[in-house]
Image (cartoon, helix red, strand yellow):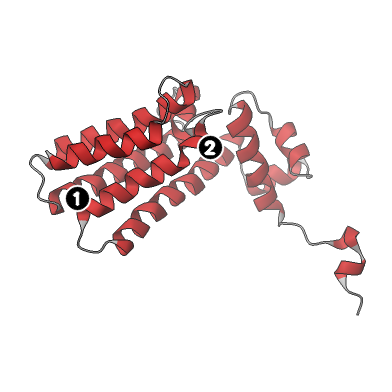
Amino acid sequence: MTSTAARPGRVAKLPPRERILDAAEELFQSEGIRRVGVQAIAEKAETTKMAIYRHFETKDALVAEWLRILTAEYRAAFDRVEAEHPGRPREQIMGLARFIADGLPALSYRGCPFVNSLAELPDRSHPARRVIEEHKADQTRRLVGMCTEAGLPDPEQVAAQITFLLEGAQVSTQNGSIDRAGERLLRVVEAVLAQ
């Protein structure tokens, strides 16, 4: 049997669905959802439009699936901080703030994909918009739970303040209005928790 290392042209590629999602993510992040056509995604994924439509009924379905994958990363961050700091909700909250702070440098070019997607998808019935709204509701629910467990007064209000800080840091990083946003975000979240 001949090794694939001896035949570089036969190096395994990702399956078509994953190539499509990778290409869509790169293009949606760099150019925006509305500016990217299915043909551009097909070319980037080294496939055909027909193959895209075999995996995703519509471009909207592809956008929604891309956002589902992103929401899974955020759910994993919540799961990770809960596992790393069991029974210590203040440390869990700070872990979430660190997750956002650590990701800020990558946002500097195009910004938060959720905020950008909402701006491009004004129709509240759009399937991708529903993915974002469900994700944000789940994030809020989990953050309120952490604030409640931490014994913070008015957990819903504290969760709202922290949400404003996390999302504001992302927008401020994107527009370049605040330097050292990650470092400052962590200090402000600590101050909110110390109230």
- The residue positioned 22% from the left and 34% from the top of the image is 160
Q: Position of residue 5 (x, y in %)?
A: 87, 68
Label 1 and label 2: CA atoms lie apart by 28 Å
Q: Is residue 112 left or right of residue 13?
A: left
x%, y% of residue 65? 53, 45
Above or below residue 30? Residue 48 is below
In-image side of 150 versus 175 (left or right): left
Mark 2: few/some/many CA within 10 Å (<14, 14-19, 20+): few
Which amino acid type is shown beneath numbered disc 1?
A: Gly
**Which part of the image, by quadrant, shows the C terminus?**
top left
Q: In the figure, is residue 110 to the left or right of 193?
A: right
Give the label on residue 43, or none. Answer: none
Where in the figure is residue 165, as x and y percent of width and height?
A: 30, 32
Asked whether, in this view, residue 116 is left or right of residue 140, the answer is: right
- In the rendered image, the residue lying farthest to the bottom is 1
Q: First in sequence: mark 1 or mark 2?
A: 2
* Residue nearest the observer in this picture, 55 or 81: 81
Q: Is the residue 83 above or below the residue 164 in the image? A: below
Quarter holding residue 53 = top right
Q: Nearer the viewer, mark 1 or mark 2?
A: 2
Label 2, secondary structure: give it: helix
Tell me the crowding category of disc 1: few under 14, some 14 to 19, or many 20 or more residues within 10 angstroms, Cα based. Answer: some
Q: At x 34% / y 53%, what residue is drawn? A: 78
* Occupied quadrant, residue 129: top left
Q: Quadrant of the N terminus?
A: bottom right
Residue under label 2, please give it.
106
- Identify which amino acid the numbered label 2 is placed on: Ala
User: Mark 1 sits on what residue?
Assistant: 145
Of 155 and 180, nearer the camera is 180
In the structure shown, which secondary structural element does the residue marked by tag 1 occupy? helix
**Residue 68 versus residue 182: which sits nearer the camera?**
182
